[in-house]
Image (spheres, helix red, strand yellow):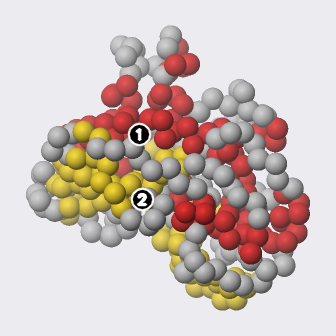
Amino acid sequence: MFKFDLDFAQMRLHFQARQQLRLPPYKGSTFRGAFGIAFKRAVCIVQHGDCARCLVRAQCVYPYIFDTPVDNAQGIFRGYQNAPHPYVIEPPLETKTDYAPGDGFAIGLTLIGKALDYVPYFIYAFQRLGETGVGRGRGKCDLILGEALDADGSWQSVYDGQSEMLQRDVPRLRAIDVMPRPMGSRVRLSFFTPTQLKADRVLQRGLNFSVLIRTLLRRYSALSAFHGDGPPDLNYGDWIAHAKGVQTADHNLTWRTWERYSNRKNRRMQISGFTGDVAFEGDLERFHLLLALGMPVHVGKWTSFGMGQYALL
């Protein structure tokens, strides 16, 4: 069985509202935007703030995290215009919009490959996010605790908000560490956040297994190429051919559309995707690890702010 060796870490960052917070029902774009601003303010050392003409761009962590260079891409990724981000933010799934002082919430954070070398930068940026404020009215909040998932399935404290110190290294995980057991010839995926997939440039309002596997293979391969040990040695045609033999047993997917504001593009953008459950049956053994890896790294578009999140049931 192919191992899908790609290091990642899963964290939970616990916040407590210091002031009244007003957040949208889906919070991923809000936290992603605020995090990006906080990260740049935390690391940028030039007055003009323009990455394109920055003297230290090649040595700066900000472009690597948010605008990964693609000029040294290898294999099938030569000519890529954009590389995938090496992180995933998982916003609170609750639709609650008003948080009173003292109310708590948690943000999930997955760091992938070489981004694991920059854990303190991520923690500090989220700390700054809380101090600067987030949402309508820029309500402030405090980062009080950071936890990380261990290979044994337990959550370990890694950051203490009172001392503002990292307490231990964040555990590095691989797909085998998060694969549910047992997994047989039938699997159900529950999509928690809107998921947008395309096949041959056509937007998929439903989901078949071969499209899912093709998208997961492409995401794994790109993350490995840009943030791991290089492009994997995979026979993609063989994997897709096997995936076509897996059938959809049942599905209950709902299409959702909403708007988000992009700070980088300075305009509103329409976002859409499906949520709900879908079950597949067939010869699934070779796909177990790939499906497991898709849970922490997500699948489809806009994964950096939480879209494409699913669980294996």
On the image, the x and y values in percent for residue 306 come to 47, 57
Q: Nearer the viewer, residue 81 or 88?
A: 88
Image quadrant for the N terminus?
bottom right
Q: Residues within 10 Å of mark 1 (few under 14, many from 20)?
A: some
Q: Is residue 180 above or below residue 279?
A: above
**Mark 1 highlights which residue?**
119
- Residue visible at 56% across and 19% down in the picture: 58
In the displayed structure, does residue 310 sit left or right of residue 14?
right
Answer left or right for 77 relative to 189.
Answer: right
Crowd around label 2: few <14 · some 14–19 · many ≥20 (10 Å): many
The residue labelled by disc 2 is 149
Q: Which mark is residue 221?
A: none
Please indicate, yes or no, whether residue 265 appears anywhere in the rendered image: no
Q: Using residue 123 as the reference point, say whether residue 282 is left or right of it.
A: right
Q: Amino acid at mark 2?
A: Leu
The residue nearer to you, when weighing 9 against 211, is: 9
Q: Is residue 59 above or below residue 40?
A: above
For the point 39% across and 29% down, which residue is it?
Answer: 40
Q: Position of residue 98 (x, y in %)?
A: 20, 63
Instruction: Look at 77% across and 84% down and name the residue there.
Output: 282
